[in-house]
Amino acid sequence: MSHHLATLLSQQGLLAHTQVGQPPFTSNHPSGFDPSILEFISADKLAAVVSQLFKLPQVNIAHYEYRTVCEELGLSTLIQKHLSLPLAKTNGTLTLAVVDPTLDVIEDEFRFATGLQIELVVTDYNAIKKAIYALYGRSLQSTTTAKKEINALELAQLVNVSEEEFDREEDLSLDDAPVSRYIHQILLEAIRKGASDIHFEPYEKHYRIRLRCDGLLVESHQPASQLGRRLSTRLKILANLDIAERRRPQDGRSKVKLNADSAVDMRISTLPTLWGEKVVLRLLESGINLLDIDRLGYSHQQKQHYLKALKQPQGLILFTGPTGSGKTISLYSGLNLLNTTQVNIATAEDPVEINLSGINQVQIQPQIGFDFACALRSFLRQDPDIVMVGEIRDVETADIAIKASQTGHLVLSTLHTNSAADTIVRLASMGIKTYDLAASLTLVMAQRLVRKLCAYCKEPAKRNIDAKDDLLGPVTDQQYQANQHGCTQCNQGYQGRIGLFEVLPINAKLQQAILQCATAIEIEALAKSEGMMSLQQSGIAALNAGKTSRQELQRVLLFG
């Protein structure tokens, strides 16, 4: 990022004056723009401010056929070097998307390379980064830091390496070794496709690598089965696991540098199977932009209920849903809002998934007796204002959390139940007294994630639906379905995911129902009468807004 732009942002009140002149704003970044600025301002807000400051149009690059233009110009090095994207050529003028228009060298170099006049437009960093990933199949990097890609011949030759050679750990630990470069390519592909997990799976006669994209596993590679042990060993080295131990599961964590500018934080889990060690990498999302509460998909009323609960000096806020339903992001978005210098926040997690500066994050270790309950007891001796417990797994943890929420602490945690009403009944069935529940519970939020229809190729929903669709109501003109073949933007008809939420604030009527040991059905009926939107209603609202499909709601919410 240029110092000039940092100064302008400071003048607009978007950066503190003390931050200007300090890293990252004085860095000599290869592209001239340092993405660490996004720790202080979101990418879309930065683009909007830059557009307004410099009177330049802000564009959505997905509306342009930039792939054709880039292929015609053949300026891949220049595009990656300057984090700029040619969008269109018209009457001797090249429309060029940039993040930071204060860097004059960008305009000069593109004018010299193309012989065209340059018209600058502004787009956000994340969009342009994703586009360059898609175009060139590797991360944004200077040519001096690029890791050489492994070719098919090198990969084939690995199959013939003897076990004696393979067992030499120093060869596997080299970053430029073929196995390392192959894993590097897979990581880049996973990030490019927005994958949350990578599965390395050995079988009797083949080996496969799958990526979990938008909640579903998709096959990515099928290397020779002989490479399985080499891949698992290299991955274990990355996480400092015992490479000689192949009989027991192991868990670790690693931060892998992808290039000069970025790294990926990941959790690594190994599992001995019949045909070798299966390894799963969880790519851990990080960054302040992910935790913007306005981008999570709450309705206005749901957001207001959540914010009101977060403002309470004490109480218990619970998030519920199956694994992979987005509970962590919802929970952390609240912690991020609460994270100020005036409060002491402590979290107990298994594992710590998102690092937040200013919060005391603790990794529990059940193998030595340091579990959630133990961590929670320790927190209460540390003068906390806000406590987060990763999950309420037993009555002891639940009891301590309840008591903490009644003694001047705001407590946030998660539970695995199907709905907000089920959460209340589950806690009561664990042995928590109903009067404690009624007194401590502030808000319960259930949620799911559904795939979002691609905005560029979605099709009107067909009206010849089956009887099982009846619970979704009639097909309307506002409803859409996925294009089976996808398009260049999505390849599968869906792109990204959106949240469906059921937000249950505990008011006086709900407290009375809890005290009377109401069933989940009775609690849900009362909550709906008080204005709560159920998960099903949230799903139908998303369907009628053209955001998701009937098929996706049936898959996730089991309609019919």
Image (tube, helix red, strand yellow):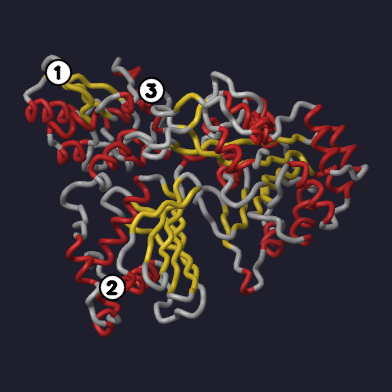
The numbered mark, 2 or 1, whose residue comes first in the sequence reads: 1
**Residue 551 screen position, x and y as percent:** 56, 37
| Position of residue 482 in the picture relative to residue 551 (left or right) | left
Give the residue displayed 36% in from the left and 54% down from the top.
Answer: 220
Front in this rendered view, residue 145 or 193: 193
Name above or below for residue 4 compared with residue 150: above
> For numbered disc 3, what is the local secondary structure?
helix
Name above or below for residue 354 compared with residue 350: above
The numbered mark, 2 or 3, whose residue comes first in the sequence reads: 3
> For numbered disc 2, what is the local secondary structure?
helix
The image quadrant where one finds the C terminus is: top right
Q: Which residue has dot 1 on it?
A: 93
Circle 1 packing at 10 Å, graded few (<14), some (14-19), many (20+), is some
Q: Nearer the viewer, mark 2 or mark 3?
A: 2
Q: Which residue has dot 3 on it?
A: 48
Q: Is residue 178 visible?
A: yes
Front in this rendered view, residue 389 or 131: 131
The numbered mark, 3 or 1, whose residue comes first in the sequence reads: 3
Location of residue 81 by image quarter: top left
Q: Nearer the viewer, mark 3 or mark 1?
A: 1
